[in-house]
Image (tube, coloured by chain):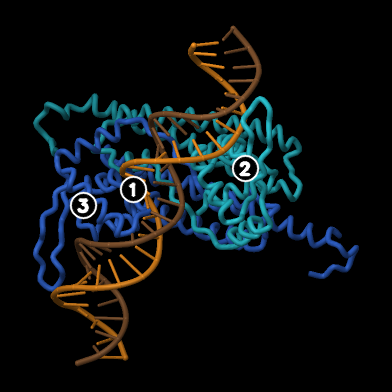
Chain colours: A blue, B cyan, C orange, D brown
DNA sequence: CCGTTATTTACCGTAACGCGAAAAAGTCAG
DNA sequence: CTGACTTTTTCGCGTTACGGTAAATAACGG
């Protein structure tokens, strides 16, 4: 159960409703941990059953009542305890890499499109992180409490830049294959095989 | 179902038994996709049910008979079809990042230990990839069929180097926090004890 | 006889993911 | 007023994945 702990981590900032948590998992912490609202609500009720969070109903007029979840002392302790265990590096599990692994058995055109979409995605992310950095850490430094968030941003920046650069390299390499394939007489016709 | 496709991707190289696949998932493709032997055998029988792979029993003396799985034309087509679909970038889902997110609510000592273990891990990986590179691609170039594998190695090298550097930075930052905490009279002192 | 390597399979549990849907009460555009 | 969208929570079904424990078979090495 790591999603539960990610939720606890979010709730260390401030009490939140499931709805707000879902939005947080779409933005800050969601940059490295995806979860939709269903997962979050389900996990929240499990956490409540365990006594790690406590829900207070807040009556609202004009909107449905909301359940504001607060970290309990038990939840806080559970988070600390979980965080003290050694972690194991997660594997990437990226479809794209599997496709590259079997490059000679798949079509390169859609793969190149995919890589170009990735490139854009990682560039966007990079720009977003840069904006976040100058906004939240204009001096480039952080208090002790915010050091973790700064480190996460640095990690994100490194990662996005590195992957974006790699995407460019990969696109070039695939383009080279395509042009090679168009030039070399490989197919059944000896020449003049216009595809 | 992406594990299934990863298996199909492995089988494009050559027919293999579940046992060999498990070893492959411990080495080359396993660098970015973990799967133990149980998952693989289960997935293999599912793939066989779908007609994507075909198992031939090879009688052995001295060892249990083995089932050599071969990609069927349907399996090959399924792989191509799957590889032509656009992929979505996978999220990292790393416990360590969650812990950094909640840095002010967890103990830093075990986190630092964790980071140091990571640093070592990523350095090992980097060295391993370098060895693989010079062994499999001494010229630094690859044929069209091997371009994907070369790209994967480059990706791995970039990634490991980048993460290792980041680990160093993170360790330094955490050490700075520790020393700050040891110097400033926060604990038993009366001021600024926001708990 | 025990442990190891090679090889496959079984059962059980649960975490995670995803789809599709719905309720209930407001706001805002057409 | 209708229809669409926001806010907020919940339910139910199914699949994929992951994890542990373990067993059966058969050789070889000590």
Residue C15: percent from left, percent from top? 33, 45
Residue depicted at 15% across the width and 28% down the height: B187
Give A160 or B145, whichever is nearer the viewer.
B145
Please, which chain is the residue tagged with disc 2 on?
B
At x 47% / y 59%, what residue is drawn? Answer: A124
Q: Secondary structure at mark 2?
A: helix
- Crowd class of label 3 (few under 14; some 14 to 19; many from 20; radius 10 Å): some
Q: Residues within 10 Å of mark 2 (few under 14, many from 20)?
A: some
- Left or right: A88 as drawn, with respect to A188: left
- Closest to the observer, C25 or D14: D14
Between the C-alphas of marks 2 and 3, the distance is 44 Å
State which mark lies toward you, 2 or 1: 2
Name the front one of labels 1 and 3.
3
- Which disc number belongs to residue A137? 1
Q: Position of residue C19 (x, y in %)?
A: 39, 66
Q: Contact (CB < 8 A) between labels 2 and 1?
A: no
Q: Which mark is residue A45?
A: 3
Residue toward you, A116 or A49: A49
Q: Position of residue B77 (x, y in %)?
A: 65, 60
Chain containing the residue with disc 3: A
- Which numbered dot is residue B105? none
Tell me whether the residue at label 1 lies in contact with that at label 3, contact meaning CB atoms closer than 8 angstroms: no
**Tag 3 or tag 1, which sits nearer the N-term?**
3
Return the residue at label 2.
Answer: B154
**Residue B102 is drawn in which quadrant?**
top left
């Amino acid at each position: 159960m790591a999603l539960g702990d990610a939720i606890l981590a979010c709730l260390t900032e401030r009490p939140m409703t499931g709805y707000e948590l879902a939005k947080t998992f779409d933005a800050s912490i969601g940059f490295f941990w995806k979860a939709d609202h269903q997962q979050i609500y389900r996990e929240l009720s499990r956490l409540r059953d365990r006594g790690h969070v406590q829900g207070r109903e807040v009556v609202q007029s004009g909107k449905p009542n909301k359940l504001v979840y607060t970290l309990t002392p038990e939840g806080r302790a559970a988070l600390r305890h979980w965080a003290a265990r050694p972690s194991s590096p997660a594997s990437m599990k990226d479809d794209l890499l599997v496709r590259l692994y079997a490059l000679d058995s798949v079509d390169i055109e859609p793969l190149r499109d995919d890589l170009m979409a990735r490139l854009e995605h990682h560039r966007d992310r990079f720009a977003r992180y840069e904006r976040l950095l100058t906004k939240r850490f204009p001096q480039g430094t952080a208090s002790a409490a915010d050091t973790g968030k700064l480190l996460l941003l640095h990690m994100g920046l490194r990662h996005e830049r590195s992957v974006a650069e790699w995407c460019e390299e990969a696109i070039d390499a695939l383009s080279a294959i395509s042009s090679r394939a168009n030039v070399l007489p490989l197919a059944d016709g000896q020449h003049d095989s216009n595809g």
